[in-house]
Image (cartoon, helix red, strand yellow):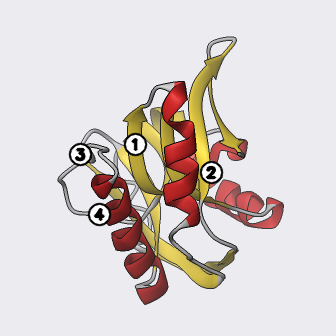
């Protein structure tokens, strides 16, 4: 099972993220855009996990209280490979919670990525924007989100489409 810990968004926040994504899409020559129901903010990527380890995952997740807290998403950017994202303004609650989550999962034997954590919501991958289009670095209308805390997600394909489903104990 391919798993990650993340923050889900309300229907309204996902609609607002879709509005930003549509601007990119309108100005893209090509790209693979995130499905609106898959919008989330990853905290810790666990990777492939055997099903018999799920109790350990849920126990670790429950041991790190995180939330509720507010996020303001307003910084548009890209990573190498045409990955476009929306990032939140600095949030001590988010960053402290992510550090605690990573630490507890490492203590419980999970091998996590060593790269620095950069909070973001992926809008799409392999995006090539049309020549001359330069999206604004900061949104004129920030997206306000409220996190009630982290959830465990399963990443899998359903009829060829990537899907992220919340798992509960």
Q: Nearer the viewer, residue 166 or 77?
A: 166
Instruction: Using the rendered view, name the quadrant where residue 141 is placed.
Output: bottom right
Could you tell me how far apart the alpha carbons at marks 2 and 3 are, in whole angstroms? 20 Å
Q: Return the disc, 2 or 3, that comes first in the chain's sequence.
A: 2
Could you tell me how far apart the alpha carbons at marks 4 and 1 are, in whole angstroms? 14 Å
> Which label lies toward us, 3 or 4?
4
SS of the residue at dot 3? loop
Residue holding disc 3: 80
Q: Which of 10 and 47 is in front in this view?
A: 47
Q: Does 17 sit above or below residue 136?
A: above
Work out whether residue 75 can be spotted. yes
Residue holding disc 2: 39
Q: Nearer the viewer, residue 58 or 116?
A: 58
SS of the residue at dot 4? loop
> Which label lies toward us, 3 or 1?
1
SS of the residue at dot 2? loop
Q: Return the disc, 2 or 4, that comes first in the chain's sequence.
A: 2
Quarter in which the C terminus is drawn = top right
Residue holding disc 4: 117
Residue holding disc 1: 46
From the viewer's perspective, is 125 left or right of 78?
right
Could you tell me how far apart the alpha carbons at marks 3 and 4 are, in whole angstroms? 16 Å
From the viewer's perspective, is 161 left or right of 134?
right
């Amino acid at each position: 099972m391919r798993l990650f810990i993340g923050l889900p968004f309300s229907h309204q926040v996902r609609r607002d993220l879709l509005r930003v994504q549509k601007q990119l899409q309108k100005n893209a020559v090509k790209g693979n855009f995130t499905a609106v129901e898959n919008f989330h903010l990853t905290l810790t990527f666990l990777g492939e996990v055997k099903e018999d380890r799920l109790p350990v995952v849920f126990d670790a997740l429950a041991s790190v209280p995180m939330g509720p807290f507010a996020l303001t998403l307003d910084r548009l950017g890209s990573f190498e490979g045409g990955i476009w994202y929306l990032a939140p303004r600095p949030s001590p609650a988010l960053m402290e919670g992510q550090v605690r989550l990573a630490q507890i999962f490492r203590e419980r034997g999970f091998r996590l990525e060593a790269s620095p954590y950069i909070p973001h919501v992926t809008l799409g991958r392999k995006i090539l924007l049309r020549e001359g289009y330069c999206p604004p670095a900061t949104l004129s209308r920030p997206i306000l989100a409220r996190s009630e805390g982290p959830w465990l997600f399963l990443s899998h394909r359903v009829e060829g489409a990537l899907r992220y489903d919340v798992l509960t104990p």
